[in-house]
Structure formats: structure tokens, C-alpha cells
């Protein structure tokens, strides 16, 4: 995958396969702590080994705006229901200011319906409020570096509209403020912007934890002062390389004293059996490490990386085809092991 840098040039969003063997060094100096805030009281956990989920890009959406401009509650329920086959307990649901601003009342209502659809299927929701990952060929949309200026306050009203009604709602597991912000330094406009977003979310009175969908290395530790729970997006291509990344995550946890989870992971592949082999060691390692996993993505569709003819480069042998289910709603070959009863259950399922 490629990210559009603020200069208009292209930069790798995640390490290439050649670099994946050496996870970025873990910085020992963290940014200054943010203003103290009340600790979360709803869905606050020290260990996320039980987390097993999927990211949600509805199959009808080529871009994030499509997901909400052409929202279909019946189809949303159909696609969420697929995840029950593999015992998913959480869906990471993407939304974005650029989608909301077209019809705020309607999009807000549709988002609430999507939350209901997920809960009806026995799963929690992890809303992701902004996207900063961009593909250079078939972009999925979201927020761009050029948008992020001190005077850009319009998205804060969007944040309030989405967050406030759900601030104390048991259906929300955790708030993900942004998918893959680019900054690896706190002295950036992007960090200042996400600081304001975090303040706004907390001012809405949220009782659930807050995270930011960061990637690896200093991209995680840069944002550590803003979150309750650290987050990682490992995309190493071998079991040994994943082990190195997990070790680096453990070091970050020790440095910050904060829990950690993985809410996007498992490299795609054009070959179903290759993808299945990768999925097996990823799910086993991440669960054992207490990080849990949320795979990318539910169903084959129109967006980049959800269709074979528009796979991204962030996969095995450059074949980043990531869905768990085909367009026909069938589990991809080799993933049958995910239908087995999970070894660990989510805390709310135990009761």
C-alpha cells in the first residue's frame, strides 16, 4: 500500500516484505503525556487475547463515502452475519467526515443502524472515525494531509454527532480515532489534530477506551499519550518476522504501562491456501500474546484490496487480496479452522 505524503510524493504506508524482518526500533523516549483524563469504566481490559474480529468495508463501497451514501441496512446485516461463521466478536466499522458532511442527519442515522446490525449478530463495535491510509491507484478516501490545519474544526461537529449518542453504550467496545496516521513525531500538525479529536471524544463523556489504529514502531509510541489502549497493525510475511514484531509490541507495553491490541492484520494473498496458512500462525501468535486480532476484511467487494483485480502490494508476493469471504458469501478455502470453537471467549460471552 502507498500513502500520499503531505508533500504530494508517495511513501510506503507499511514496510515492504524486504524490511518486514526487522521491526522498527522501539523508541525509549515517549512524547510528553497529555492532560490527565478519567479512566474508562466500560469494556476496560488489560488483556485482549480473546479479541477476534474483522474490519468492515461493505462490498458495495469502492470508497469510504460509498459505504454511507449508498447505505443498505439489509445488506449490512447480511454481510455482518457472515462473520458469525468464524466466531467474530467485534467489527471495526469505518466512517469518515467526508461521508458524513453530505447528509449529517441521514448518515448519523445510518451509522446507528449499522451499530444495531452488528449488535444483533452478537458482536461489539469498534468505530473508526477517520482514515489516513491512501492508495496511489485506487484510493479508498478519507482525510488527507492537506486537510489538517489549525483552522480545520468542522470535523469536530461530526465527531460529536457520532460519539455522543454512543458514549455510554455497551455495544461499543472501543473508539478508534483514526486509521494509520502517518506521523512518527509528536511535533506535527497531524498529532495536534488527533490530540484535538481525542479531547473532543472524551468531552462527549465516553466510558469506553480510546485507541488510534497505528502501525508499528514509533508510529505507535508517538500516539501513546493520547490513548487508553495501544494498537498495532502487523503485516510481516513470515512467522519469525511476526515474532519479532510481537516482541517489540511487548516492549512498548512495558514502557507505557498500557494494554495493547491488534485491530488490523493478516497479510492477504491471491492464493487461498497461502492466505490460510498465514491466517493460522497470525491468529495463534496474536491470541497467545494477549493482543487478539482483527483481520482485514469481511467480504470481497469493490474497494482496493477487497477485489482480486485491484489487490494492493501489502500481501504475500505482492498479492494483497484480503477478504475472508467471497462475493458469493463463502468462506475462502483453507480458513475452515476458524469455524472451530475459540479457545478464549470474550469477557461478555463468559456471563
Image (spheres, helix red, strand yellow):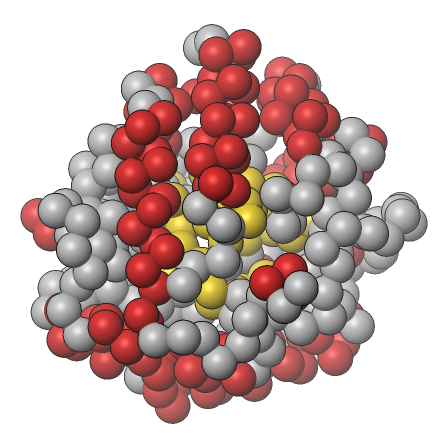
> Horizontal placement of 118 versus 252: left or right?
left
Report x, y in % for residue 192.
70, 39
Task: Give me the residue at 52% from left, 42% from top.
Answer: 119
Q: How many marks?
A: 0
Q: Which of 1 and 76 is in front in this view?
A: 76
Please say whether residue 19 is visible from this viewpoint. Answer: no
**Furthest residue to the front?**
351
**Furthest residue to the bottom?**
240
Quadrant assignment for the C terminus? bottom right
Quadrant assignment for the N terminus? bottom left
> Horizontal placement of 273 versus 143: left or right?
left
Report x, y in % for residue 180.
49, 50
Q: Which of 170 and 282 is in front in this view?
A: 170
Task: Give me the residue at 53% from left, 66% from top.
Answer: 51
Please say whether residue 102 is visible from this viewpoint. Answer: yes
Q: In this view, does 134 lie above or below 346?
A: above
Task: Give me the residue at 29% from left, 39% from top.
Answer: 78
Q: Nearer the viewer, residue 186 or 228?
A: 228
Q: Nearer the viewer, residue 211 or 14?
A: 211
Q: In which quarter of the image is residue 251?
A: bottom right
Report x, y in % for residue 182.
51, 49
Report x, y in % for residue 239.
35, 87
Task: Give me the residue at 40% from left, 75% from top.
Answer: 341
Amino acid at each position: 500500500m502507498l500513502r500520499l505524503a503531505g508533500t504530494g510524493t508517495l511513501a510506503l504506508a507499511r514496510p515492504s516484505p524486504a524490511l518486514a524482518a526487522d521491526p522498527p526500533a522501539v523508541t525509549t523516549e515517549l512524547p510528553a503525556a497529555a492532560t490527565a483524563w478519567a479512566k474508562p469504566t466500560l469494556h476496560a481490559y488489560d488483556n485482549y487475547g480473546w479479541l477476534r474480529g474483522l474490519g468492515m468495508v461493505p462490498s458495495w463501497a469502492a470508497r469510504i463515502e460509498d459505504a454511507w451514501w449508498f447505505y443498505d441496512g439489509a445488506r449490512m446485516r447480511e454481510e455482518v452475519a457472515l462473520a458469525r461463521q468464524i466466531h467474530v466478536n467485534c467489527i471495526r466499522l469505518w466512517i469518515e467526515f467526508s461521508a458524513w458532511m453530505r447528509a449529517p442527519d441521514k448518515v448519523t442515522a445510518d451509522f446507528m443502524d449499522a451499530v444495531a446490525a452488528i449488535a444483533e449478530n452478537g458482536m461489539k463495535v469498534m468505530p473508526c472515525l477517520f482514515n489516513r491510509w491512501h492508495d496511489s491507484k485506487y484510493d479508498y478516501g478519507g482525510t488527507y494531509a492537506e486537510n489538517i490545519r489549525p483552522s480545520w474544526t468542522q470535523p469536530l461537529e461530526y465527531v460529536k454527532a457520532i460519539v455522543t449518542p454512543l458514549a455510554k453504550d455497551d455495544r461499543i467496545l472501543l473508539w478508534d480515532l483514526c486509521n494509520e496516521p502517518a506521523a512518527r513525531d509528536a511535533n506535527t500538525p497531524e498529532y495536534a489534530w488527533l490530540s484535538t479529536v481525542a479531547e473532543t471524544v472524551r468531552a462527549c463523556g465516553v466510558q469506553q477506551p480510546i485507541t488510534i489504529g497505528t502501525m508499528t514502531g514509533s508510529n505507535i509510541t508517538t500516539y501513546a499519550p493520547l490513548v487508553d489502549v495501544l494498537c498495532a497493525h502487523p503485516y510481516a510475511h513470515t512467522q519469525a518476522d511476526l515474532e519479532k514484531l510481537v516482541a517489540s509490541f511487548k516492549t512498548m507495553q512495558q514502557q507505557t504501562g498500557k494494554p495493547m491490541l491488534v485491530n488490523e492484520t493478516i497479510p492477504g494473498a491471491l492464493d487461498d491456501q497461502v492466505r490460510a496458512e498465514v491466517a493460522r500462525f497470525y491468529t495463534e501468535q496474536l491470541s497467545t500474546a494477549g493482543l487478539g486480532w482483527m483481520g482485514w476484511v469481511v467480504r470481497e467487494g469493490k474497494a482496493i484490496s477487497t477485489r482480486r483485480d485491484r489487490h494492493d502490494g501489502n500481501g504475500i508476493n505482492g498479492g494483497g487480496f484480503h477478504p475472508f469471504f467471497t462475493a458469493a458469501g463463502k468462506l475462502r478455502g483453507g480458513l475452515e479452522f476458524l469455524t472451530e470453537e475459540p479457545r478464549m471467549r470474550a469477557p461478555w460471552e463468559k456471563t
